[in-house]
Image (cartoon, helix red, strand yellow):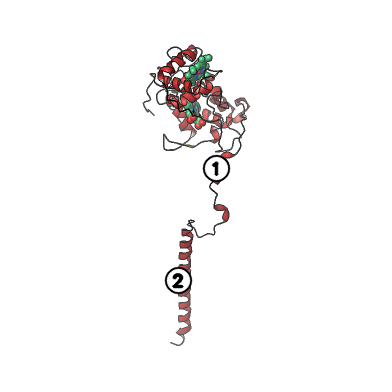
Amino acid sequence: MRNNKPAFVLVTAVAIAIVGAGLSIFFNRFIDLTGGVGDTTPVPKATVLPPAAPRLEKTATVTYAPPSPRDAPAEIREAVLLGANILAETGKYASRYVGNKLSCTNCHFKAGITQGGKNGGLSLVGVGASYPQFRKRQNYAVDLVTRTNDCFKRSMNGRPLPEESKEMTAIVTYYQWISKGLPVYAEIPWLGLKHLKSSHVPDKAKGRQVFDAKCAVCHGKNGEGTSAAPPLWGDTSFNDGAGMRKPANLAAFARFNMPLGNPDLSDEDALDVAEYIAAQPRPHFSGRQ
Ligand code: HEC
Ligand code: HEC
């Protein structure tokens, strides 16, 4: 019995130490959790970010300086040039996937190599650094293959390109090349359409007058297209699921780009003519994959 006493003291001491350590870990965690960190590691001050910090990258300055497709390195040159050809003459270089008389370049001027804004159409310079991107339509982040096929299915009233096809690889290689040097996920000011701020309520009847006076000479009396300009409605134009079918998009596009070379519409004229064009018959988007 006498010999067991030191052992008993030792066991008790160890037990107290274990319980103490356990309690201290428990309370430590508890304290950290109430601090909103949820981790027992010490919190360096820098991780407590000021509210504006996550946006810093977005304000990084970007410079418009896309390289020419012809200057692409030998290994990707063929793909880049095929991509440029597909965007410029879509019905010729990707005929199986096109269901109308449009080419990408009719909306994405100069095969997308533009700085947007006035007379620039819809730029594609920088898309290679801006995707995958959240899209409400899919309620998920979509990559450039899916985004490009959106335009094939809707703007081109056609079919999606298989992801592994030579044509899709060429288009994506082209995007990457013309986006060279732009920081990934920086805000690129020339991408996308900027909707008009006017609160004008669009008037279709006035829109028809604008169309007859300023658009029909090139796009045809019935929007069917002429040798001077592509169709705006009817069987050979974009379908009713296309981005350009939305009056707000069409108005913004027309305001800064039409009549081609000399865009002079007021916000009100642009909204009226867009309402008129959007109301005309065109192929129905069936949602086919
Ligand atoms: C001087 C001729 C001309 C006039 C006038 C003109 N456009 Fe265009 N438009 C074009 C050409 C050419 C393109 C294709 C540009 C390209 O491929 O680079 C085009 C493209 C478009 C597109 C995108 C492609 C398509 O067919 O859907 C829309 C939308 C459009 N024009 C709307 C209008 C509207 C609205 C007006 C009148 C306010 C108008 N245009 C007046 C020549 C013209
Ligand atoms: C009738 C006009 C039209 C045609 C033709 C068209 N697009 Fe588009 N495209 C749009 C519109 C409108 C948007 C949406 C712009 C926005 O979100 O502000 C868009 C967006 C895109 C985007 C995403 C751009 C971004 O800034 O995120 C890509 C990539 C694209 N198109 C590729 C193509 C390709 C490739 C073709 C040809 C196969 C094509 N488009 C044909 C109208 C067109």
Which of the image's four quarters has the N terminus?
bottom left
| Of the pair 168 and 28, the residue shown nearer to us | 28
Q: Position of residue 215 (x, y in %)?
A: 48, 15
Label 1: how many Cα within 10 Å (few below 14, some 14–19, many 20+): few
Residue beneath the point at 45% across and 81% down: 8
Label 2: how many Cα within 10 Å (few below 14, some 14–19, many 20+): few
Instruction: Report helix, strand or loop for mark 2.
Output: helix
Which residue occupies the extreme front position in the image? 200
Residue beneath the point at 48% across and 69% down: 21
Residue 280 is labelled as none
Q: Which residue is mark 1?
A: 55
Asked if one can make out residue 236 in the rendered structure from this viewpoint, the answer is: no
Q: Quadrant of residue 207?
A: top left
Q: Which residue is mark 2?
A: 19
Identify the mark nearer the N-term, 1 or 2.
2
Mark pair 1, 2: CA separation? 46 Å
Q: Position of residue 257 (x, y in %)?
A: 53, 21
Which kind of residue does numbered mark 1 sit on? Arg
Q: Is residue 17 above or below residue 129?
A: below
Q: Is mark 1 within 8 Å of ligand 2?
A: no
Instruction: Report helix, strand or loop for mark 1.
Output: helix
Q: Quadrant of residue 161?
A: top left
Asked if one can make out residue 179 in the rendered structure from this viewpoint, the answer is: yes
Give the foreground label among 1 and 2: 1
Q: Are marks 1 and 2 in contact (CB under 8 Å)?
A: no
In this rendering, position of residue 261 left or right of residue 285:
right
Which kind of residue does numbered mark 2 sit on? Val
Q: Is residue 160 above or below residue 133?
A: above
Which of the image's four quarters has the C terminus?
top left
In this rendering, position of residue 261 left or right of residue 137:
right
Q: Position of residue 36 (x, y in %)?
A: 48, 56
Residue beneath the point at 48% across and 77% down: 13
